[in-house]
Image (tube, rainbow, N blue to C red):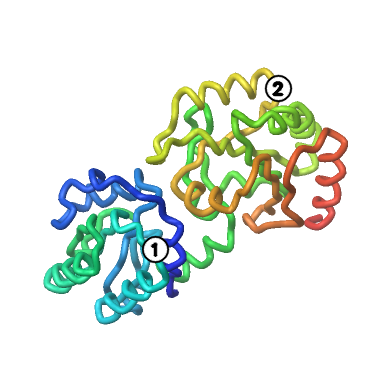
Amino acid sequence: MKKMISVLLAMIMLVPAALADTPDGMLTFDQVQERIETNLYLNLIDIREVDVYDAGHIPMSMNMPYESLETEFQAILDSGFSHMETEIILYGDSAEKLLNSVQVVKGLGFTNVSYMSDAASWPYKMISTDEEIAQAQRILGGMDAEDIYGNQVTEGVLSDCKLTLVNVWATYCNPCLQEMPGLGQLAAEMKDQGVQIIGIVSDTLDYYMNADPDKIKLAQEIVKSTGAEYLHIVPDTVVARNLLPQISSVPTTFFLDANGNLVGGVYLGYRDYNGWKAVIEETLALVD
């Protein structure tokens, strides 16, 4: 699958060059994994052939084969991209090709470029293109997060219910807080019908995707004071990269079936108890 790297790069904010310990040198596996976990705007580029990439690659990396690397980066620059300090990590199995690729990208003006060799020995998770496509079709596909109390939450949390209402909210959002008592009441009342409610607290991560303990504590206090005693998730890398960029305002609410597929519409803004009850019943009829 060909990634839309030009689109992704065009959305990237400047990332401080200090993020890379050796901006033009080789990074270890652990250093690359740390970048993946802490840099929301990382550009991780696999320079291997398409068929090799499709068979298994680092999640969320982009395929730009060695032979077309310079052409594709030049096209990005020709489109008007100018954030030359954005962090770029190239990886593959040939040290010679990687060193040449680093020089090509730096020669085009990018200043924060590093590389990782021996991709075949990568000790962390790999994913095939087919698996990645299947995950992308599920909004929370591949999620491995924690709730606001530190308990692990994966995509599997959806499988025990017919319908899950997912409410994306923020601690600063008054309309979000106003609708939470009604959502808490509905979570208790509709549990026996196979309905659950999950909150995603969108502002609990800092710029580098580290959990903000003050925001999490505030979220806990809000949940307690509003009676919204259902599951509330701190975004992980998957949610932060795949879902949150699509959220233009909070609250935003949508529904997923037991397999993680979107059901019904996406709802922006506040609704009271009666409003949400009507929407839930209408959406539940789509999966019954």
Q: Amino acid at mark 2?
A: Thr
| Residue 11 in the image: above or below residue 128 | above
Instruction: Choose mark 2 or mark 1, whichever is in front.
Output: 2
Residue 113's x, y, as percent?
Answer: 22, 58
Where does label 1 land, which residue? 127
Q: Is residue 54 visible?
A: no
The number of callouts visible is: 2
Q: Who's the residue at 69% across and 54% down the image?
A: 257
Question: Residue 237 versus residue 108: which sits nearer the camera?
Answer: 108
Give the secondary structure at mark 2: helix
Left or right: residue 45 versus residue 231 is: left
Left or right: residue 212 versus residue 141 is: left
Residue 190's x, y, as percent?
Answer: 80, 37
Residue 228's x, y, as percent?
Answer: 69, 27
Left or right: residue 189 versus residue 66 is: right
The label on residue 226 is: 2
